[in-house]
């Protein structure tokens, strides 16, 4: 019987971070602050689900954190900011209406009502100015947390709408260098389809077969497959392993030649994923 890897399971969710499912497959992330009633939300693509979550929990929205300018991530900002008068953090290099605190790589932010300090990480590729937010811990849970928008997904990565393969490889490398126990909160529930592609790219991997089986079970139970962890992604995400011997062999069979370097391998893999059914 193939070896099973218990670390492939979705990690236990952070007690102060909650998913707000919205739109077709988005997750907006609601964070409880250190003040008893304080909350922040990451990438609210519409206002109504956030308002409902705040009302149900008796919390006040003190901050909005934005990773990039796409409508399904910023569509609720105007209404939420108007009602709550909260600060709005967003990438300094993108034009996003309503941002009051433009931030750049290397800056640290502490949202109102929070004691957690978030580092801003530059991760272009999906968009030119995409950023992520990283905290070494939040509340009493010692695990680091990452809000990575549409750059890194569970078993996948974002499409290259504005950036280049070189940029995305560098961005993914920055995220992959974070501690393996980091909880990675991406913005979409794409895990099952991403794992279907990952198994095509590395068909002999028992770890991928197991992760796919478990993701199907999790989704059948109506549970989110996010957060994932950086350790899980390093081991099974094909875009973080695009220069592994197994994936290079698959790409060589498809292309009729072996990609010459890691960026070329990533670009070929991303093009394949774009057309994968």
Image (spheres, rainbow, N blue to C red):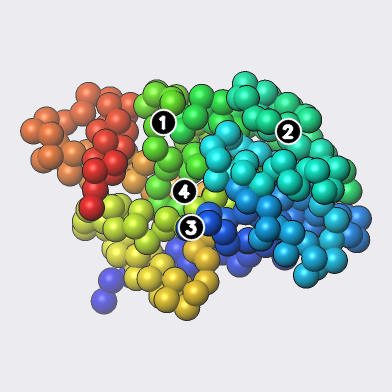
Q: CA distance from mark 4 to mark 1?
A: 15 Å
Left or right relative to 106: residue 33: right
Name the residue tied to disc 3: 25
In this orientation, which residue lies closer to the viewer: 109 or 210? Answer: 109
CA–CA distance between discs 2 and 4? 26 Å
Residue 82, how many percent across, how many down? 80, 43
Is 26 placed left or right of 209 in the picture? right
Residue carrying label 1:
161
Q: Residue at x 46, y 72 (%)?
A: 218
Element type at mark 4:
strand
Location of mark 4 (residue): 153
Residue 91 in sight: yes
Q: Nearer the viewer, mark 4 or mark 3?
A: 3
Q: CA distance from mark 3 to mark 1?
A: 19 Å
Quadrant of the rendered image containing residue 268: top left
Whichever of callouts 3 and 1 sits on the residue coming sooner in the sequence is 3
Residue 69: x and y in percent read 58, 34
Quarter of the image holding residue 105? Answer: top right
CA–CA distance between discs 1 and 2? 23 Å
Circle on res. 275:
none
For mark 1, give the secondary structure: loop
Q: Which residue is mark 2?
A: 98
- Which is nearer the N-term, disc 4 or disc 1? 4
Q: Would residue 100 appear left or right of 266 to someone viewing this image?
A: right
Task: Depth check: give the residue in front, 161 or 206.
Answer: 161
Q: Earlier in the sequence, mark 4 or mark 3?
A: 3
């Amino acid at each position: 019987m193939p070896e099973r890897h218990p670390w492939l399971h979705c990690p236990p969710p952070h007690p102060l971070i909650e998913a707000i499912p919205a739109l077709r497959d988005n997750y907006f992330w609601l964070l409880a602050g250190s003040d008893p009633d304080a909350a922040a939300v990451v990438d609210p693509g519409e206002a109504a689900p956030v308002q409902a979550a705040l009302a149900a929990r008796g919390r006040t929205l003190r901050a909005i954190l934005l990773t990039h300018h796409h409508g399904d991530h910023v569509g609720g900002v105007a209404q939420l900011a108007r009602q709550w008068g909260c600060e709005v953090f967003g990438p300094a290099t993108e034009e996003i209406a309503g941002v009051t605190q433009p931030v750049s790589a290397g800056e640290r932010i502490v949202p109102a009502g929070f004691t957690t300090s978030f580092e801003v990480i530059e991760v272009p590729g999906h968009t030119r100015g995409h950023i992520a937010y990283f905290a070494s811990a939040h509340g009493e849970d010692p695990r680091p947390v990452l809000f990575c928008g549409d750059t890194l997904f569970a078993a996948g990565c974002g499409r290259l709408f504005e950036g280049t393969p070189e940029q995305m490889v560098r961005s993914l490398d920055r995220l992959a260098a974070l501690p393996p126990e980091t909880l990675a909160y991406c913005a979409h529930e794409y895990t099952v389809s991403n794992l279907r592609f990952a198994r095509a790219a590395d068909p002999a991997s028992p770890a991928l077969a197991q992760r796919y089986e478990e993701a199907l079970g999790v989704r059948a139970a109506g549970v989110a497959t996010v957060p994932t962890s950086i350790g899980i992604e390093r081991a099974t995400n094909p875009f973080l392993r695009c220069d592994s011997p197994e994936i290079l062999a698959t790409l060589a069979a498809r292309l009729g030649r072996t990609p010459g370097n890691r960026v070329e391998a990533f670009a070929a893999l991303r093009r394949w994923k774009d057309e994968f059914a």
